[in-house]
Image: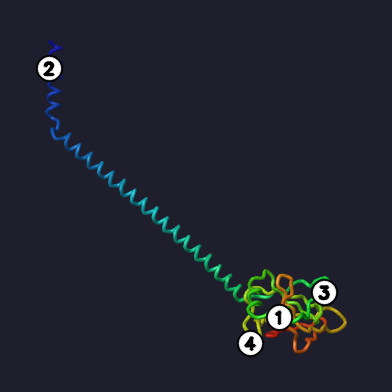
Amino acid sequence: MGDNTELTREQQLMEEFKAGLDKDGPVVLAQRVAELEGQVAALTAAQTGLEDELVQQRERADAAELARDEATDRAEAAEKEGRAAQGKLRQLGKPTKPRAFGVMPANKIMTGDALRDAIAKADAVEIVFSDGKREVGVPPIAVEGAAWKEHAFGLLLDRPVDIVGPDGIGSTSIAGYALLLDDKQVAWRERSMPLQIAPGQRIQIADDILF
């Protein structure tokens, strides 16, 4: 009798439990789960959007940096070309033995367009100070870039030249200038009057070297 009573009590409790459950509970719970899943999906999409925007910002930053580097390279190249276009002179070492460069036959002297083109194509352009037969001991100069300008009588060196008289007991006489292209003399220009320079004396020559 006691067992049947206990069993009946359990059944009663179960019925009471079932009766107390909200019938709409599962539906509400499912809706809430769906809402939470929707929120999670929205947050995930937002995060993905932020990540995509970050990637795009990085790409834009990289592109801007690349454009800046390219602009810098172009500016440096333009500056280099500008320096080359301006031209410059460079003093060379004095040869250990004077070279025989000086007066040359008129029909061997290069002039005009031929000289201009040859200078443009030459790897080395050199001006030698001569007494008419050979070097006088003044270091030659290398001409780099567009250091020449047109003149009524040929090509004029458009840069001043500083020279120093060689060591010795007497003055040195510069009768003219020899033009060498790749170590070969192609032109000669004799001065109207020889230039006298004392040992150690510094002289600047301007608008005087003409071929």
Give the structural element (helix, strand or loop) at label 1. Answer: strand
Q: Which residue appears at 82% of the width and 83% of the height?
A: 172
Residues 186 and 180: in front is: 186
Residues 35 and 75: in front is: 75
Give the foreground label among 3 and 1.
3
Disc 4 from disc 2: Cα separation:
133 Å
Judge from the rendering whether residue 8 lies leftward or rightward of residue 100; answer left or right.
left
Residues 143 and 167: in front is: 143
Contact between marks 3 and 1 (CB within 8 A): the answer is no
Q: Is residue 191 above or below residue 184?
A: below
Disc 3 from disc 1: Cα separation:
20 Å
Q: Which residue is mark 4?
A: 152
Disc 3 from disc 2: Cα separation:
135 Å
Contact between marks 4 and 2 (CB within 8 A): the answer is no
Q: Which quadrant of the figure has residue 203?
A: bottom right
- What label does residue 161 carry, if any? 1
| Mark 2 residue type | Thr
